[in-house]
Amino acid sequence: MKRRSLSTIDRVGFNMNMNKESGFSLVISLLLLMTLTIIGLSIMRSGVLSEKQASNIQEKSVSFHGAQSSNNSVIETYRYDQTILAQTLNAKDLKIKTCVDYTGSVTTDCDTTPTIDSATGVLKGGTDTTYRGCPKAFKCVGNSAGMNNQNSVGCNVFQHQGEAWVDADRDGVEDANEAKTQIEQWSLLVSACGNS
């Protein structure tokens, strides 16, 4: 029987310990890699959710400004286009639907009206305007002319309900997942009251 030297036995034992430690190191490395992967994926998911939230907020803001622009365009139209004003005045308590195109023009033909933002854009909008009557001047804030006169100046009161939505899929139809905003706004036109 051959005798091994002490140094040979120590090296064999040392190598056996190294093999056991290498396996343990591999397991620890894999666990660490798996933990870092999970953390990385959750950070990416958080970033994607933040981006979606920012996109939704931006679309909501755009639709809000579209609805407000639609209302303001109708109110400004009363100054230079008497036909839409006359249609609204003759339809007391009935809604007159108007739409605005990207040039700021107001029309009652909403079927062929392009989008608000550009000819091929994604922002659609319109306003339902209702004439609510003409209280005499003493009810009109800041105006007291002719309070006792039968044909006095008064405030023609209009209710505007503007609406806009971001037509993301460009199909011309309002979908449930598209950002939409409705705004109610009132305006006064100081002029002679008719038979209201």
Image (spheres, rainbow, N blue to C red):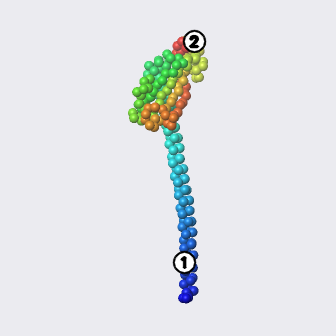
* Residue found at x 44% / y 32%: 172
- Kind of element beneath mark 2: loop
Residue, far front = 1
Nearer to me, 107 or 50: 50
- In the image, residue 143 sits, relative to residue 60, either above or below, namely above
Q: Residue 149: which numbered mark, if any? A: 2
Nearer to me, 72 or 115: 115
Residue 77 point in image, percent of width and height: 46, 24
Nearer mark to the viewer, of 1 and 2: 1
Assign the N terminus to one quadrant of the image: bottom right
Residue, far top = 150
Q: Residue 15: which numbered mark, if any? A: 1
What's the residue type where badge 1 is placed? Asn
- Kind of element beneath mark 1: helix
Q: Is residue 34 visible?
A: yes
Residue 163 point in image, percent of width and height: 50, 30
Which circle's residue, 1 or 2, is located before the other in the chain? Answer: 1
